[in-house]
Every structure is written in C-alpha cells, then in structure tokens.
Image (cartoon, rainbow, N blue to C red):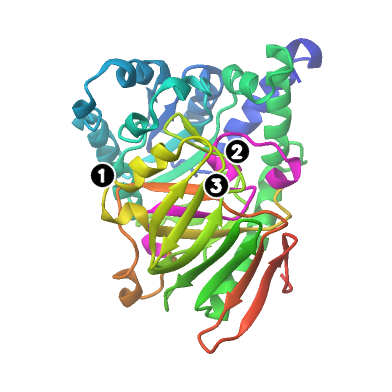
Amino acid sequence: MSESRNGGGRVELVSSLSDLIVSDVGVNVQAGQIVGITAAPGMEAVWRAVAEAAYRRGASYVDLWVFDGHVKHSRLTHAPLHSLAYRPPWWGERYRSLGALAGAQIRLAGEPALGLMEDIAPERLGIDMMPRLPETLEVTHARQWNWIVTPGPCAGWAARLYPDLTEAAALDRLWEEIADIMRLGEPDPAAAWRERFAQLDAVARRLTALKLDALHFQGPGTDLRVGLLPGSLWQSAGDETAGGIPFTANLPTEEVFTAPDPVRVDGHVRATRPLTVGGGTVVDLEVHFLEGRAVEVSARQGAGLVEAMIATDPGAARLGEVALVDAESRIGRLGTVFSETLLDENAASHIALGAAYPDTVSDAGSRAQINESSIHIDFMIGSPEISVTGLTADGGQLPLLRDGRWQFAV
C-alpha cells in the first residue's frame, strides 16, 4: 500500500483516516473549537492530516503536543528514583485549560519505539506513567471535552510488529490492517461505523435490561467472578459532553462496558494478550483478586510494572471497568497483537484496574460506590476459550459469550 507501489494509496488512506477521526462518528470537531493533538515522533503524516481536517471543519486552533519516548528513557535511566513521580504542572494544566474551554482532544495511539523500555527496571517504569496524566481522567469524568483515542500508524511501530518484513513493507502491512479495522475500505466508512455502533448499542441495552448481579469468566487459567452494582449501566463508545456534543471516545471500538462493584471481585485471571503500558510490556500476566483487591500478581515479564501501578493509590488495585468483546471484532479476527491497548482491548474482553467512568452507572447510590483512582489500566482476559456467564441475584445463570458469540439475539 506504499505510495511507490500503489499510486499514492497511503496518502489517500491518511486522508481518509483523518477525515474519519474529526467527523461526527469520531471526535466530532465543532466550528470554533480548540483542538489538542497528542502524538509521538514518526506520526507526522497523520497528525498533519488530522490538523488540516480539523481546520477544514472549522477549528479555531490546533495545538500539537509530541511526547518522545527516547527522552523518557533517558530520564528513567539516569534520574534519581525519588524524582520519577514528578509531573510538570503545566502538562496537567494544558488538559484542564482545554477542558475549561470545551475543546476537543485527539490522542494518536501507537508506539514508534516499541521495546525501547525493555532495559528499564519495571519498578522504575511503574512510577513514571507519562504521557498518561491524572488530569485527563479529571476532565473526562467532568465531561468537559469531546475526546478520542485512535491509531497513528508509523514506521517504528510497524517495524516491531512485523520484524520479518522490510521497513517499507512493514508500514504497508500496518496501514492495510488499520484500514481494515477502521473500515476505510468501505464505500462509506462513517455509515459502516454507524451500523456497528447500532449493534453495540443493542447489546449494551440488552445487558443493562438483564440487571445482572455478577459476571463469571471461566477458561484456561481463569476462574473470575466480577460483581456488578445495582445501577451498573452497560455502554458502548458513544458519548456526549456536558454541553451536548456527541462523540466516539475510541475508534476503532468493538466493546460494551460497565462499572463493576470494586469490592466484589474474586478469583484468578490470566491475561490473554500482552499488556503494553508506559513503554513497558507485561507478558503472561496473572492476577488473583480477593474481595475486590488484586492481592497477588505474577508474569513472565513485567510483574514489577503492574505491582508499581497498583501501589499508586488505594483504588489502583481494584477494578473500574469490565468490558465484553464478541467475535465480530475485526481486530480480533485479524489475530495481530498490536502492542497498543486501544487496539488490543478491542480484540478481546478485558478488565481495567483503577478509575471507573461515572456514566457507567445509572443512579447516585451506585455512583458513590464506583472505584476511584488516578490510573486506568486495561488488560485483556477474553478469547474464544473463555466463557462469560451472567449471574442473577437469585442464583440464576445466563450464558452471555460462548466461543466469542453472543448467546442472545442482537
């Protein structure tokens, strides 16, 4: 799909992706809005196209912020341990200001220096979570901005995903897969997404109507019960700001999700995909929960990173989200492990340590019970081998997912 082999095909894909990101099925940039873009080196073609598309929709100003993982690597290698928790206050204020101005925020996901942090001790890596900042959760929970996380394909990311290919062929392959999962090959990508949104919304409404007390995940290495709150409200990725602007928070999106009861999670779970967070990778993660808390963590690689994260604050060791993904996920069907949470979490059912989203509960009583934390870290626990059963308060059992297929009509 390179320009040289396909007559500018990649340029066309960059343009199509950018138009989709800023459209009403994406972040939905409004006339007069200030738009923030957070990206990494190597994504220049994408961020420039996104900025142009945003200006075409009437943005008044596009503010670009580029975070370089190599500079973070230098800090983690040489800076004193006690300094690694420091975050420059102006970074958080950037997000707070954007929220106060009812702006839009776009994060281009993908790691151009994948594997860069492999020589850093996980304990150090778990302290410095930048570019993740707690202020983003603060503004998001207040519904002050329309925001989106979406792919920013780049050569460095592609080279690590497809090491047997040349750099040009690897980037072509990444763009081909991104085009598929973003539905860019459809005659009308936006219409294709609206159709998928309708399917996900129907599933979310069905799950909410069941008024389940808990979910039971069972399969190889996993026997986990996740309690739900009386007001747990199943959602898909569609959202709306406090000012009434509709937007999609993740694109692609293939999940339905809700808030669990943070004190009723018990059992053992094995991650079905590697977790990439903060530049580090956790492989073969296993977590044991007791009365809602992660009390034991093990992994073939990166256990110390998870242990450092769950020590961040009292809520970091409890769950803030449980999400279900069915076999219709285009990402799951590809079979590629993208080493990027946005994509990997939409390939398989998952849970998240840390903060819950307030709009995933329907009443004030349940809202008072949801988990609070400065982190939100998803890890994947689903596969065709993992069954998901809904449990009712009176002891009933309702099959939800078997072989990745919904067990009710959608």
> Are the residues flagged by discs 3 and 1 in contact, CB closer than 8 Å?
no
Helix, strand or loop status at disc 2 = helix
Helix, strand or loop status at disc 1 = helix
Task: Indicate which disc, 3 or 1, sits on the residue closer to the N terminus.
Answer: 3
Q: Is residue 308 left or right of residue 323?
A: left
Image: 21 above or below 406: above
Look at mark 1 in the image and give the residue it sits on: 100
Q: Quadrant of residue 134?
A: top left
Instruction: Give the residue type that dot 2 points to.
Output: Leu
Q: On the rendered image, what quadrant is the N terminus found in? A: top right
> Is residue 80 highlighted in magenta?
no
Stretch of the chain drawn in magenta: 330-359
Q: CA distance from mark 2 to mark 3?
A: 8 Å
Look at mark 2 in the image and give the residue it sits on: 20
Q: Position of residue 20 (x, y in %)?
A: 60, 38
Task: Indicate which disc, 2 or 1, sits on the residue closer to the N terminus.
Answer: 2
Helix, strand or loop status at disc 3 = loop
Q: Quadrant of residue 170?
A: top right
Could you classify mark 1 by the number of other residues whose Cα lies within 10 Å: few (under 14), some (14-19), or many (20 or more)?
few
Instruction: Give the residue type that dot 1 points to.
Output: Ala
Could you classify mark 2 by the number of other residues whose Cα lies within 10 Å: few (under 14), some (14-19), or many (20 or more)?
many
Instruction: Give the residue type that dot 3 points to.
Output: Asp
- The residue lying toward the viewer, choosing from 123 and 16, is 123
Q: Is residue 112 left or right of residue 63?
A: right
Q: Position of residue 363 (x, y in %)?
A: 36, 75
